[in-house]
Amino acid sequence: MAESLENRERACYDALGKEKGNPRMMSQGFLTSKLEKAIGWARKYSLFQYPFVTACCGMEYMATAASHYDIDRFGAGFPRFSPRQADVLFVVGTISHKMAPVLKMVYEQMCDPKWVVAFGVCTCTGGFYDNYATVQGIDTIIPVDIYIPGCPPRPETVLDGLMKLQDKIQHSRQEF
Ligand code: SF4
């Protein structure tokens, strides 16, 4: 049964190869894809993150990176501490107005394509720090791709946010 299936598969490749006038395609397996899809796939599984960690959410960020949750399984386990070598900015913790220009500069130093994750309710909206010193959401300073809620977010929520970012990367228009 398995052999006859294999023969049928080979006959199918032969027919396709003849039709396309490509003898190399005959009796060989081949794979077709769009370049854009392949680049999206490569980009989403090779994320180099820059952790901009300012407050208590940092503990949860570290827990996600540690062996129990193992963010490396998603191809995002390699933090870079130079914005020029990173493509995802993880903003983790409360951002004060004093810190805002630094965050903006880090973002501007990153090369395109780049993405931003707001990690925790303080970065998303200012959280319960409704005061003159705290930025009320980092999207008032830089564009944000994914918002991860929670105070602090559980590692499962962080991984869910990461998978949503990967999905977004895969389905975006790939510039290269
Ligand atoms: S969201 Fe909660 S845990 Fe995270 S930085 Fe703000 S106060 Fe701390």
Image (cartoon, helix red, strand yellow):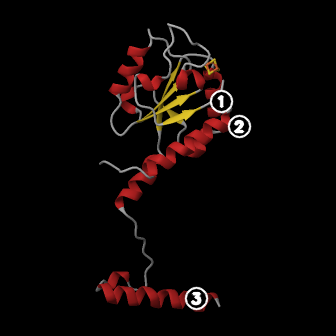
Rounded to the nearest whole Å, what is the CA distance between mark 3 and mark 1?
A: 50 Å
Quadrant housing the N terminus: bottom right
Q: Is residue 11 left or right of residue 74?
A: left
Q: Which mark is residue 68?
A: 2
**SS at badge 2:** loop
Residue 36 figure quarter: bottom left
Picture layout, residue 31 above or below residue 59: below
Up/down of 94 relative to 2, above or below? above
Ligand 1 within 8 Å of disc 1? The answer is: yes
**Height in image: 107 above or below 6?**
above
Q: Residue at x 67, y 38 (%)?
A: 156
Dot 1 crowding, Cα within 10 Å, few <14, some 14–19, many 20+ = some
User: Which residue position is annotated with label 3?
Assistant: 5
Viewer-proximal residue among 170 and 147: 147
Q: Position of residue 92 (x, y in %)?
A: 55, 24
Q: Can you identify the residue that label 1 sits on? A: 153
Residue 70: give x, y in percent of width and height. Answer: 64, 39
Say which residue appears at 44% left-offset and 47% top-offset.
Answer: 169
Label 2 vs 3, first from the N-terminus: 3
Residue type, label 1: Pro
Helix, strand or loop at mark 3: helix
Ligand 1 - quadrant of the structure image: top right
Q: Is residue 92 visible?
A: no
Residue at 50% from the left image edge and 18% from the top image edge = 136
63 left or right, relative to 146: right
